[in-house]
Image (tube, coloured by chain):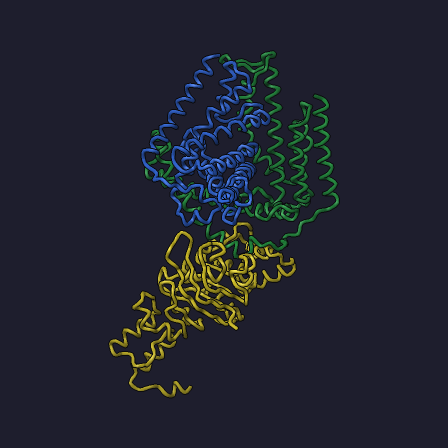
Chain colours: A green, B blue, C yellow
Amino acid sequence: MHERLSFFVKRDSPIHRLNPMTKAVMALSLVLIAFLSPWYWTPLALFLFVILPLSLVARVAREYWNFILKVILPTLIILFIMQAFFLPGESRSIFEVFGLEITELSARLAFRNVMRILVMISSFTILLLTTHPSELMSDLSRRGLPGQFAYVVISSLQIIPQMQAKAQTIISAQRSRGLDTQSSFLRRVGGILPLVGPLVFGSLVEVEERAIAIEARGFTSTRPKTFLREIQDTSFDRALRWALIACVILTLILRIWLS
Amino acid sequence: MRETAMRSQKQSSSWLNIGKDFNTMTWVLMPVAIAINMAVGQIVATLRLPVYLDSIGTVLVGVICGPWAGALTGALANTILGLTINPDFLPWWPVAAIIGLVSGICANYGLFKSWWKVVVSGFIIALAAAISSVPISLLVYGGITAGGTGMITAFLVESGRGIVQAVFASSFLTEPVDKITTALLAFAILQGLSKRFLARLPRPENVETDEKISRNQLLIAVGVVVLLILFAIFLLGRLTGAA
Amino acid sequence: MAIVNLQNVTYKYPLTDVPVLQNINLQVEEGEFVAVIGPNGAGKSTLCYTLAGFAPHFFKGELTGIVEVAGVESHNSILSEWVLNVGLAFQNPFNQISGAKYTVFEELAFGLENIGIPRDEMIARVEGAMKLTGISDLADRSPYSLSGGQQQRVALASILVMQPRVLVLDEPTSQMDPIGTREVFGVIHSMAESGMTVILVEHKMEWIAQFADRVIALKDGEILMNGDPSEVLTSPLLPSNGFGTSRYTSVARRAQELGLWNEGKLPITLDEAVRGFNSSLTKEEIPDARAK
């Protein structure tokens, strides 16, 4: 069981040193530009000329490619094939099998859609590889996000791996009792409740004690909060954020103007 | 006089009262609910069942804490799981939020108090989820996703439907079974929790059942689900056959 | 004036008719170490929750009488202010981890961030509490990766940093092994030494006998006895009411029945038992040993 659910790789790089909010704005801007841009090649260009250099500057290229190749690429390939075959597009056929065909138009559309999704996943991946979750939530709380949000996010990140481990234990326990994934459909349906029951009830009972424990530590205090983590926010950060927002607005204007 | 007093009483427990949804128990329950979504989804996937059930925690929070807490749980669940476990979750956060919101509203109108009402809730949640997932499917994936629903869409497109129509149809075919099962399971869990525990949460009145839950009702509920599945299959046949 | 003052306190949980606490009258002086004992269902945990403000502020229900800590009455306070005066730690160390933090250091700072303690003071307080509870070397570890005893010390330290006037502990060692128990009692002892007012619910009589200034025996929501440890813990009322007793007391009581114990008072600690048996079983007293 991994202790925590976090991509974060502790390194020293210019990207790591950026303010977390700046990186979050960067990730969102990249996604919005990829989806809003009126030009066909924008997602690919963003990937080649922004995402890849970023991963190198941030010194997380190895981790980034590891994740993309192992986890994301297989899904993207399936998505591309399905879309290329089934997206409607009346144009020159370039490939045909079992009466299904890929046309030039459907292939073009499929490629753009897949690139957009790649940019979306990549920009968030780089954000998470270079930003510790506590740092991000601390910074957002300082900027006025209610402390409860930070609590929910960080707590989820810690509870999920614990719950995954519990689910695995339950699954293997049930398997050893003969409940196989190859059993009949009805047996598997009947198998849900004994599997899910203990997991859910067990974790719900803990809720009350944890609520008491954090109340005892001023969780609902109305006094102004302070923060243990000190997070830098330079004038460069601020300038970069405004520039990114300007790029998004520009893309939006071009999109409306050109269509 | 009396009527106004009663109405103001009702107003305070109305689903529009956002503040009522959030107490410390709600905030502590939310991460647990998000983890439950993930764990149950994982178990169900292991058992290779034709449902996801990965919004069960969201529905639980929606019912017992209120629609706004449910919506927030759904949105955060998909964002957090999308950013850490499976990026596929990420774009669907508005759908997850709507599932939490609608289940909370259903519960507020007393639709989580008996088995057959829960089936109705599940159906309403499914409709809301289907409608809200169409624009996302079209905008983010161009209509064809990589999962089972995408397969059905592809099938419908191949049989001559327009892409928008195909996305709508496939969403309406897949959602009800999943969401009704989810709602029923959430209801079963809530029935199993002690009154003492439920009383600490913001809206325990949502699951106060006055009548005894009978076995017959459960059988009827299951019957309705089976009928729905058959209807979906029939519809699918018609949609593809007509082309 | 007593720092803790309960007068005619009766409390009922919601959805119940039977009060869990009935007519409780209790005064605790500043710096006192009070132990609370009682069989299951005696209302010990509810007493803790009442002192810590959770009954009625968290659990709702119906509280009558006066609950006063440091001159403030519970009815007139809100929970988030009340917890600044009364800290609470309880049985399960795992459930006391906030979950909002990745390291022990941050975990301890969580409460201080919530109540807005300036950063410099925050760090000083956290370091102080880690030193007192002996967890300084765990500062960068994840709270979830620790042993039960370590987790419980983190939980105690997390409350200590808040610097409450009164510390309420509800069976903090009930889920610990002997090593964990010793670790946790070490911490409780040093807190009491530092002058903090401690109210401890505990089953382990040997430990109570060592540390407590006063023992309160609770039964069916009422105070059965309230007095000096050597009196309360050796009272014949304890075994007849379903309370546990220290094993030293039990052995000596049995010896007394067999005529092997001639001392007036029954022992509550190992030392007292040794001394008592020594003088009961050896014909001649050992006056020179005593004189030394």
Residue C190 seen anywhere in this rendered image of the structure: no
Which quadrant of the figure has residue A32? top right
The residue shown at (59%, 27%) is B140
Instruction: In the rendered view, tell whether residue A77 sits above or below residue C80.
Output: above
Which quadrant of the figure has residue A224? bottom right
Please name whichever residue, C186 or B193, is drawn nearer the observer in this view of the structure: B193
Q: Where is residue C49 in the image (x, y as percent from the top left)?
A: 46, 59
Q: Quadrant of the C terminus of chain A?
A: top right
Which quadrant of the figure has residue C119? bottom right
Q: Where is residue A209 in the image (x, y as percent from the top left)?
A: 46, 53
In the shown orientation, is residue C111 left or right of residue A243? left
Residue B85 seen anywhere in this rendered image of the structure: yes
In the shown orientation, is residue A259 left or right of residue B57? right
In the shown orientation, is residue A22 left or right of residue B194? right
The residue shown at (32%, 78%) is C277
Furthest residue toward front? B1
Q: Position of residue C261 (x, y in %)?
A: 29, 79
Q: How many marks?
A: 0
Furthest residue toward left? C258
Instruction: In the rendered view, tell whether residue A7 sits above or below residue B226.
Output: below
Q: Where is residue A222 in the image (x, y as percent from the top left)?
A: 60, 54
Please name whichever residue, B188 or B167, is drawn nearer the observer in this view of the structure: B188
Please name whichever residue, B172 or C185, is drawn nearer the observer in this view of the structure: B172
